[in-house]
Image: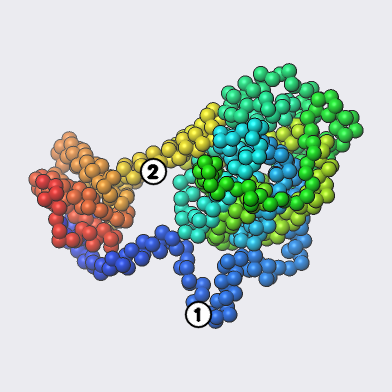
Amino acid sequence: MTGIESKNYSSMTEGKRLVHQVVVPPKDSFAIETGRVVRETFFHDVGPLDWFKGVSRRQQCLLALKYAFPIVDWLSTYKLNTFLYDLLAGVTTASVAIPQDLGYASLLGIPAVYGLYTSVVPPLVYAVFGTSRNTSIGIVAGVTLLLGEMLKREISPTADAANYLRLAFTATFFAGVFQAGLGILRLGFITEFLSHASIVGFMAGAAFIISLQQLRGLFNIAPAHFSRHTDLVSVVRSVLDHTDEWNWRTIVMGIAFFAFLSMTKFLAKKKPRLFWVAAIAPLVSVIISTALVFLTRADKHGVMIVGYVKKGMNPSSAHQIFFSGPFMYSAVKIGLVTGLVALTEGLAIGRTFATLCDYRMDGNKEMMSFGFMNIFGSLFSCFVSTGMFSRSALSYNAGGLTPMSNIVMAIIVAITLSVLTPLIYYTPSCILSAVVISAVLTIIDLKALWLIWKVDTLDFLTSLGAFFGTLFVSIEIGLLTAVCISFVKILFNITRPHTAILGKIPGTTVYRNMAQYLKATSVPGILAIRIDSAVYFSNSAYIHDKILVYLEKEKQRLGKIDGPKVCYLVIDLTPVTNIDTNGVIAFERIEKAMKKHGIQVFYINPLPPVQVVLLLPTKFNELNP
C-alpha cells in the first residue's frame, strides 16, 4: 500500500516539500473494540452506572429510586405555586379530553365509555414513570384509527363485540410489552426508521381519513351500515349510498358547532392569550348540544345520541386478555405495529417540549413509561395511548410545569365517570364528530410539508407516499410506503456517496470543493479527490469507478488546453470514518490502474480506524487478480 502522507501541495509547486509524519494509533484489543461498539450503540448518552460513582450508599439508593420512579425526583422539590399552574393545566386538558375521548372511541367501534377509561389509568402511570414534564397522555387519532382498522380485519365489532374488546385489550397489552422491551434493551433507535417526513405525511392522511369517517355521525348514518374500510373511496361511497338515513337536524347541528369550534381556534391563534376559549369550546359544545337535544327531544326525530354510558371507574380486564389461541398471534402483530407508531409520536412530542423548555428527556425511560402505562391500561379496560401533541401544547400554554397536570386530568375524568356519566345520555353523536374533526384537522402541518419540500425532495416523496397510501389504501400501506421510500433514500446515500474534486483557493493553502468554490483552481500535475463517506462493500465499486471517471475527465480537460499531465492522485480521506475489505481492494485496484498510467497515489488525513487498515501488511491481490 502506498505510504500515507500529508503534504502542502502549494509548497511542492514552489520547489519545497513539507512532509508531516502521521502517527499510527495503537490498535485496541477485540474485547475493548467490541465494548466500545456496544457502549456507543446502547449507552451513547450516559454510562449505565456513571450517576452512582463517588457518592454514598444512601445517595446511591436515592438516585436508584429516582431513576426507577422519576416522580420521586420532581415531587421532592414540588411547591404549592407549581401545583396551581398544574391544576389549571389539568382542568384545561380535561375539558378537551372528555369530549374527544367520547368521539375517538367511535374510531374503534367500541362504547364511548372506554374512551374515558383510557384517560384515567395511562396518565396516572405515566406521571410515575415519565421523564417529560409537558407530555399530556391520551388517545391519539392516528394510532386509534390504525388500531381500529387492524382489529376490524380480525373480528367484526358488531358481530362479536365481546371478542373484539378482548382483542383490543390484548393488542394494547402487547404494544406495551413491545414498548417497554425497547426501553429496557435500549433499542429506541428502531423508532428512528419512521422519519419525521413519514410521520407528517401519515398524520395528514390519517386526519383526512378520520374526518371522512366522522361523516357517519354528521349525516346520522347507523354504524352497522357504514363502511368498515378506511380508504377514501369506500368511505365516500358509504356516505352516498345511505342518503336515506341523512337527518337535516343532525347535519345543521353538526355544521353549526363545527363552525363554532373552528372560530374559537382561529381566535386563539390570532390572540394567544385567549387560548382558554378554544380549550373549553369542545366541552361547551357538548353541554349546549346535550341541553338542546334534551329540551327539544330531537332524539325522537331521528337524531342519534350517545345513549347510556356505564357509570363507575375502570373495570378490570386482566381476565379478558388472550394469552393463547389464534387471536393472541393477531394481537401480537397489531400490538407491534401500533406500539411502534405510538412510541414514535410520543417520543417526538416529548423531545419537542424538552427542547423548547430546555431540559433533558431520557428517551429509553420514556419508552419504558409508555410501555408500562399501556400494560397497566390493558388490565383496566384501556386501549393504546401515547403523548398527544394538541393536549400537550394546550397544557403548556395553560402553564403546566410537571406531570402533575396528567394526574389532575385523570382525577377529573375519574370524577366524570363516577358521577356525571348520566348527563352524557342525550349528547348527540354529531357533536362528538364535530369535536373530532376540529381536533384532527389541526395535525395537518402544511408548513412542515413545505419545509420538507424545500429541504429534501426524497423526504417530500416519503411524506406523499405516506399521505396517499393512507388516504387511498390503508394505514399500514401508507406507513409501509413511507418506510420503503425512506429505505430507498438510505440505500441511495450509502451506495452513491458524495465525492468532490478539490482545488486550491487563491491566496491560501486551503483546498475545497471546486464545484462549490468557483475561484478554486487545480494544481498542475495533481488531481485531488475527497470521499465524503465510509468506504464499504456497498459503495466501494462506485467510488473506484468515480475516481477513474474523474481522472479521465481531467485528462480530457488537460488535453484541450495542452496542460501538464496528471502525476499525482491525492485522495482526501478526512470524512471517511471507516473502511472494510472491499474498500481496501477498491483502493488497491485504483493503485494498480494508476501505476499503469505512471501516476502516484497519496492518501491524506485518514482517521485512526482507516489509517490502521490501510497500513496492514496483508494484501488482497490474490482475491482481486
Badge 2 crowding class, 10 Å Cα cut-off, few under 14, some 14 to 19, many 20 or more, is few
Colouring used for the render: rainbow
**Point 85% across, 32% down: residue:** 293
Amino acid marked by disc 2: Ile
Are there few (<14), some (14-19), or many (20+) residues within 10 Å of tag 1? few
* In the depicted structure, whether residue 454 falls above or below residue 272: above
- Image coords of residue 617 (percent x, y): 15, 61
Q: Earlier in the sequence, mark 1 or mark 2?
A: 1
Labelled disc at residue 490: 2
The picture quadrant where one finds residue 370 is: bottom right
Task: Please give left or right for residue 303 compared with residue 485 in the image.
Answer: right
Where residue 584 sits: x, y (%)? 20, 52
Q: Is residue 353 left or right of residue 496?
A: right
Residue contact at pointers 1 and 2, CB within 8 angstroms: no
Question: What type is the residue that disc 1 sits on?
Answer: Gly
Foreground residue, 573 or 520? 573
**In the image shown, does 573 or 422 lie closer to the viewer?**
422
> Is residue 492 something that shows in the picture?
yes
Q: Which residue is located at x 49 percent, y 49 percent?
A: 191
Report the residue that reaches farthest toward the bottom: 56
Residue that appears at 65% across and 58% down: 125
| Callout 1 secondary element | loop
Residue 16 in view (yes/no): no
Q: Is residue 263 left or right of residue 360?
A: right
Name the residue nearer the viewer: 9 or 113: 113
Secondary structure found at label 2: helix
Write down the residue under mark 1: 54
Which residue is at the front of the view, 260 or 328?
328
Q: Residue at the right extreme?
A: 295
